[in-house]
Structures are given as structure tokens and as C-alpha cells.
Amino acid sequence: MTAPQVDEVPAPPPGPGVVAPFAAPPRDRDMKSLWIGLGVGGLVLAICCVGGVLGGGFLVAFADNLTRTQVADVVRGYLGALQTQNFQAARDEYLCAAEQRNHSVGWFKDHYGSSPVVAFSVDEDEVVIQQDIVVPAHVQQRGRVERLMEFTMSQEGTRYVICGGVE
């Protein structure tokens, strides 16, 4: 009996159900389905990119409008407190710490006690958002000509406060 050589592959045993020791040869791919798949993938990618750009633009516009509304509301609250002569609230709720140090409640009584604010208007569309946020307001005091006041805003924590333009 001779030992089988290493290079020889034994023949399959005879009989039904015998499988050859190799797989079927690969078939050529259909190039049409490849190009359809690539086209659909490219279209989905383009839609995602356009959607991302548009979504980012809408997000920036929404944030800008939200900021304009918030700072305008702060100025409205401040001028409303001056109109009702609630000087403590005008100082404590709407001014930054530096402005609170510069303007006591007595200062407000001196400047607005005898000539209170009788009317004011704040237009959100006129708010300037650049390096500083500036909110213009048309203010009418009793016995005085209507004037334009410009309030510089800053952010303390999560809220906006007036930190300039208090006269």
C-alpha cells in the first residue's frame, strides 16, 4: 500500500447526492442594476445635502427672530415699569449688574418721577444684531418731545438685560 501523495485530490465516492468539491463559477453582474443603485444613492445624498443646508438656514433665521423678540420684550418690560413708575422693578429686573451699580432707585425717581414715560414703541424689525445687540425705542415722556433711545443688550446667564443706553 502506497501513501497518497499530497498533491492528489481524491475522487468523490460514486453514488447519488455526491457534490463536486468546488463551487459553481461566478456569473457576470448585470451593469444596469449597478448604475441604477448608484443613481438612487446619489439622489438620496443630494436630497440630504440640500435638506441640511435649508434646515441650517431656517435654524439660523429662527434663532435670529427669537433673539429679536426676547430683547424687544426686555425693553418693553423696562419701559413699562418706568411708565407705571415701578422703578425698583425697572432697575432690578431689566438692568445688568453694572447698570444697577450706576443707577439707584433714587436716580430713577429723579429722572422719571416728575416726567414719567407716557408712551413708547419698540419695533422688533429695527433691532440690530451685530457685535452688540441694540434695541431702539421711541419714548414719550410727559412734558418732553418724543425721543429715540437705543438700549444695548447683554446676556446674563440665560436672560437678556439692558447694559447700556439708560439715560
Image: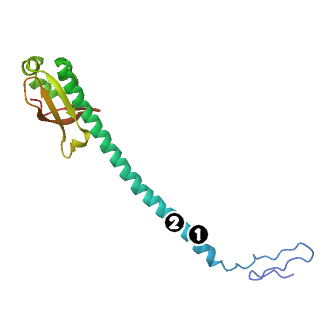
In the rendered structure, the answer to whether residue 157 lies left or right of residue 36 reads left
Residue 3, image quadrant? bottom right
The residue closer to the viewer here, 76 or 21, is 76
Q: Earlier in the sequence, mark 2 or mark 1?
A: 1
The residue closer to the viewer here, 120 or 32, is 120
Residue 164, image quadrant? top left
Task: State whether residue 98 appears in this view.
Answer: no
| Position above or below: 118 against 41 | above
Q: Position of residue 95 (x, y in %)?
A: 18, 27
Q: Position of residue 82 (x, y in %)?
A: 17, 22
Name the amino acid type tagged 2: Leu
Q: Quadrant of the C terminus?
A: top left
Q: Position of residue 52 (x, y in %)?
A: 42, 55
Residue at 20 percent of width and 26 percent of height: 78
Q: Nearer the viewer, mark 2 or mark 1?
A: 2
Circle 1: element type: helix
Residue at 74 percent of width and 82 percent of height: 7
State the mark number for residue 37.
Answer: 1
| Position above or below: 52 against 26 | above
Q: Quadrant of the N terminus?
A: bottom right
Residue 33, image quadrant? bottom right
Circle 2: element type: helix
Label 1: how many Cα within 10 Å (few below 14, some 14–19, many 20+): few
The residue closer to the viewer here, 73 or 139, is 139
State the mark number for residue 43.
Answer: 2
| Position above or below: 15 against 108 | below
Task: State whether residue 123 appears in this view.
Answer: yes
Label 2: how many Cα within 10 Å (few below 14, some 14–19, many 20+): few
Name the amino acid type tagged 1: Gly
State the mark number for residue 74.
Answer: none
